[in-house]
Structure formats: structure tokens, C-alpha cells
Amino acid sequence: MFKDPFDPKTLLRQRCACGGDHAPADHARLSAVPTSDEQRFGRVVDAAVLRAVFPVDARRRLFLKTVGAATAMAAISSVFPLATAREAFAQGGAPEKKDLKVGFIPITCATPIIMAHPMGFYSKQGLNVEVVKTAGWAVIRDKSLAKEYDAAHMLSPMPLAISLGVGSNPVPWTMPAIENINGQAITLAIKHKDKRNPKDWKGFRFAVPFDYSMHNYLLRYYVAEHGLDPDKDISIRSVPPPEMVANLRADNIDGYLGPDPFNQRAVFDGIGFIHLLTKELWDGHPCCAFTVSKEFATQNPNAYRALLKSIIDATAYASKQENRKEIAKAIAPTNYLNQPETVLEQILTGTYADGLGAVKKDPNRIDFDPFPWNQFAIWIMTQMKRWGQLKGDVDYAKVAADVYLATDTANMMKEMGLTPPDPSKKTIVVMGKAFDPAKPNEYVDSFAIKRS
Amino acid sequence: MPTLKKSLGLRAALLSFLIFAAIVGLWQIAAQPPAASGPAVDPEYAKLVGAAAATGTKSAMPTPADIGVTIWKHLMDPFYVKGTNDKGIGIQLAYSLGRVLLGFGLAALFAVPLGFLIGMSPLVYRALDPFIQILKPVSPLAWMPLALYTIKDSAISSIFVIFICSVWPMLINTAFGVASVRREWLNVARTLEVGPFRTAFKVILPAAAPTIMTGMRISIGIAWLVIVAAEMLVGGTGIGYFVWNEWNNLSIANIVTAILLIGVVGLLLDQGLARLTKLVTYPE
């Protein structure tokens, strides 16, 4: 996809599963090539035009070999306005609605949604987006359902819950992009620094951000793997993230599995320590998501495209380690996360104080990857089923495909010259146990501790 | 007599000042960060955590001096706008006041006429009493999810919550005031063959006005209490949102600033209505 289409040696055929003209194994190497978006968009357009002019690859190569790339460019430009095409592509169709409101919860999971505002990813797509800080998950859900927000940051299980009508009226909701993977942690109060084995946690009071959250499912999974029943041996309640630190300080809870910055914030304030990163339970788990109602996506296709492009673009930018410090600075002010910059920097760079006097380094503490794997959705639904949130039979694959719009994202990534991953290649391993998305029911049955 | 009164006022002011100084002084002493007690941590680690955590303790309460600085900073620049989620404290207070006055005004428009009706008719009074008694003690925050769900607009929801919470004291006080107008006055009006409308406006209203105003005074107090809670829940703008946003940042100094400002504004609202009450009270 990133090869110069004017290079005579390049084969321009749709071959790879991602749609690019290269072998699937070349993804990693090729994604490093384009240095700026303009270049990337430019190449995509050039390739499309060349493909149209020379449907037969061999002829194109012959032509380029004979006249040279520069002449070819000039020749084609004289009959086809390449520059205009590139520009038109970069802008897409004019968005039906330019002034958009996007709700977010002030946590680092929302980094792409937030940073797209100060760093200009929205305005680059011709959108005038207002990012609105919201007080809690239930409120963000209600405000989204009430159409006060055009799009919103949600926990990745929420669009599934909304679509299924669990905890609210069923409204078709879609999730075209995951924002972050990993990036959560279990934080315990300092007084428990010697109780590092979950078997000692009987009677502990834990907090998670929301009932329908990866945090809840991961905490339940973790303690259940250590033989504790999450409904009987410990108590789990849902507490808005900012209140977690205050509650930990006041000794109302013993710990929480929560989103950052509040894990690192507890360390910063000397209240708690980081017991483990959720990455250690499931490396690459999804957490938060960028969601829109199906209605918005169908009624405003161009605005939806532009919005999704900005998010994918911002996510790609955030996934690069070297940009993380700049991002921490951009999202720290009161208008966005309202946190000390050093706290955000530790989270995003992965060089952090653990709360027990050690400095740890884990560059993948949080990562950003927009691709909404359907496997994620199926795993989440198995856990909803496991803990009794979801009753009766579920058509796992269908709901997953309806809500987690992997195809949309893949197309959008292709258009932007990014390489979408191969959906069949994704494997999920949680705490050493592999998950087969083709057999969700067997997976639920395989757990000793469950509600259904 | 006047000198005694004057000296009493002076002494009260002096006592207030002493109490204030004692509280602030004790606070300043209590909030002093404790001396480093924990083991020394390595400097690389210390750079990554707050000052308190670096010495092995929890972050401390801010001192009154810190809070003074914060208040000064906010009062110097109360009307800045640095984006959707970061506006000056003056703007936030204005948003909250606007919501309160709107919700309260609507409640008054609804409660005073209805209260009049209830007060004049024992039948209506009895019929509506169970509803009023059940709805009156409901906490404002309990209304919030219902309002968000049905109204589907957070701005209108918070105004609705103000309305529903400030309507009851006005309704009850109006009904009570109207019902307890002296019989003799009504009888005099009847003897003079005054029409019912004239009786209502010339006899009952002036007689019940002080009670109605007292109800309003209670209501505005409740409305001001409610708005902070409602805005914390819904977010967006307002002084409640400001408190919530600073809570996110665990910034106690900013929260204390907001608490003091909420108190001052509440006081002003209450005093304003107290003045109005005095205006409509006739000495018998």
C-alpha cells in the first residue's frame, strides 16, 4: 500500500487480505514508510489513478520503465488533475454536519478522542468538534441516547449492552473504533502491600468504573482464576473513576481495577500501589471505544467518515511511542484531563513509579489500536453471559458483527493508507487460557465459577 | 440603649473574627506536611510522584495559605474561557445562578397560584395532600435519572430538578398562608360585599404574603443546594461541574474555593429574599 506507485518495480495488484499490493508478511515494514499524511493520502490517490489508467499491471510497469516516473506523473497530470484528486480524497465528501459534539470521560483511555481536539485531527477533516467532559458512564450513555452527543467515548462493552438492551432500552449502537488496548491496572491501598496473592483478598471491597466494563470482567476473571467467587468472597461496586482515589484514601475500598490516570494518581498521592497492569492478564485487551448511534452513521455518512478518519488518524499517531510526551502535554490541561503532566507522562510512556518505591518500565502499558476485532465483542459477551448479565441464547457472531464495525474500520484504514490487520489472525489469550470465538458457549461452560 | 447595641455588634464581630482566626490557625498547624518519616526513596522515583509520596506519606490537606492563593487566582480572572470544559469560576457561577433562577421562577409561577387554590379550598387541599406529602421528601438526585430518561436533555433536566425540589415549600407555605388568613378579615370583606377576586388580591394576598415569601426563601435555599449536586451529576457547566472537575484532579484547594463561593452566593440569595419579605410584611 505504501509503495511508490510510480516505481516501475512495484506490482500494483490487490492481493493481500488488507487490500494492499504486498504480501501480508510485509505489513510491519511497510507501515513505516510514509512520513506524513499528505504523502500517504497522495500515494493512495496516485495508485488509484494509475490503476485506472493502466488496468494491466505489466503495461504500467512497461510505461514507467520507458518514460520514467517524473514524465509519467506529468503526463497523467496533464489529462487528470492528480493534485485535485488528492485534495478531494483527503477531504472526502463535505460532511453533512460540521459542528459536532463528542462526549468523553476524563481518563487516558480517551486519549485519541481528546487529543484530536488540541492537536487538530478533527479540524484537518473539516470538522468543528466540541469535546465535552462528562461526569460518568451512565450520564454519557443517557446523553448519547438523547442525541446530545453526536458520538461518544464509551467502555467497549457498552455499545453491546445498549444494542442488546441490557441496562437500557435497546438502541442500535455501533462501535467503529477501539481507542486503547491495555492501560488499566489493579491498584491496592498501601496497607495491603504484603497481600500480593489474590487468595488473601477474601472480604476485600473493590471498585470498578461500571458494571458493563472490561474492568469488571477482568477483575472477576482474575479473582475467579484464583479461586475466589467475585460475588461472594469479595465485593465489587461501580464507582466513578475520580472517586476511586478519594475512596481509597478514605479507606472505603481496598482496591480497584480502574482506568488511568487514577492508578498512577493514587501512586502520585502516596495512597496506593499498582498491584498489576491488566496487560499482564490479557496483553492487548480492548478497553474504551469510540461509538456512534447507527442512526447518526447512516444519516450523516460523510460526517461519520470524517469523524472516524480523525479518530483513526489520532489513534495511529498516539500509538507511536515518540509522540507520547507531546500528547501528555496536550491533554493535561483543565480543559481536558485536568491532571499533573508527570502522571500522564508516566502512563503514556510506560516508565512509572509503582507506589512501592520502584520505577518500572513497560512501554506497552497502554497502547492505541483502533481495530474493533469482532473476537473482542464475542469475548465480552461470553463474560456478560458468565456473570448473568445476559440471559438466554445469544447469536454471538451476529451481534458482534453488527456492533463492532470491523469492516468499516478496515475500509477506512485502507483509504487512509494504513494497513488494517487480518481479522482471522486474531488470537485472544486471557491468563494463559486461549479463547476460541467460534465456540463461545463451550468457553462459558469451561469456567468453574460462573452464574449461569 | 444604642451604645449598648453598638458595643454588642462590635463584640460579636470581634468574637467572629477570633473564631475565624482560631479555625484558620488550627488548620494551618494541622495541615503542615509531616516531616519525612518513611525511608528515603531513590531520586528517580521521587521525581515521578508527588512531594508527599516521595517521603512515604499521603498527600496532605492544603493549608489556608494555599487556599488563599487559589481564591485570589480565581477572583483575579473569573471570566476566562479556555475551551468547552475550562471556564472561569465567574462564568460557572453565572450558569448555576441562571439555572436556579429559571427553575425557581417556574416553580414560583406554578406553586403560588396552585397554593392559593389549595389554601382556599379544603377539598382540593385534602385531595392533593397525599401527593404532596409523598413527593416532597424525595431527594433531588433521585429525580435526575428519571428526568434525563424522559426529558432527554441534560440542561432542561437540571432545571426540572430545581423546579421539582423548590416547588414544595412554596406550595405548602402558600396554601398554609392562604388558609390561615384571619376569619374576621374575610368576614369584613364579605360584609362589605367585596367580590371574590378582589378579596383574593386585596385581602388574602397581602395577608398571606409574608408566609409565601418565607416559603420562597426556603425554596431558593433548596434550589441552590440542589444545583450543585445536579451539576456534579450531569457535568458540562456550572459551579457543581467545577467542583466535580477539580475533584477529578483531587485539588482540594479549588474545591474549598468553590465551597466558599457557593456559601457566599447562597447567603446573598437568602438575604435578597429576606429583604423582599420585609417589604411585604405589614405591622399589625
Image (cartoon, rainbow, N blue to C red):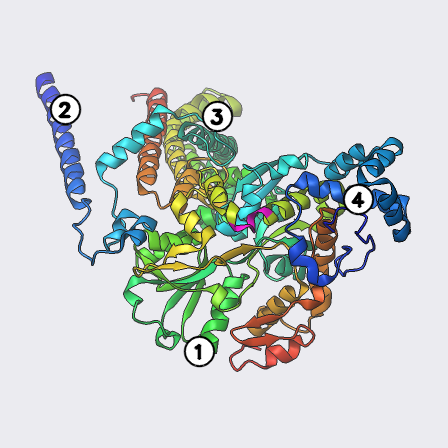
Question: Where does label 2 land, which residue?
Answer: B9
Q: Residues within 10 Å of mark 2 (few under 14, many from 20)?
A: few
Q: Residue at x 47, y 76 (%)?
A: A224
Q: Residues within 10 Å of mark 3 (few under 14, many from 20)?
A: some
User: Label 2 is placed on what type of residue?
Assistant: Gly
Q: Residue A168: x, y in percent? A: 61, 57
Residue in the foreground of this view, choosing between B273 and B76: B76
Question: Same chain, marks 1 and 3?
Answer: no
The answer for how far apart the CA atoms under marks 3 and 4 are is: 91 Å
User: Label 1 is placed on what type of residue?
Assistant: His
Question: Same chain, marks 3 and 4?
Answer: no
| Chain ID at mark 2 | B
Question: Where does label 3 land, which residue?
Answer: B200
Question: Where does label 4 land, which residue?
Answer: A6
Range shown magenta: A317-321
CB contact under 8 Å: marks 4 and 1:
no
Number of the front mark, 2 or 3? 2
The answer for how far apart the CA atoms under marks 2 and 1 are is: 69 Å
| Chain ID at mark 4 | A
CB contact under 8 Å: marks 2 and 3:
no
The answer for how far apart the CA atoms under marks 1 and 3 are is: 75 Å
User: Label 4 is placed on what type of residue?
Assistant: Phe
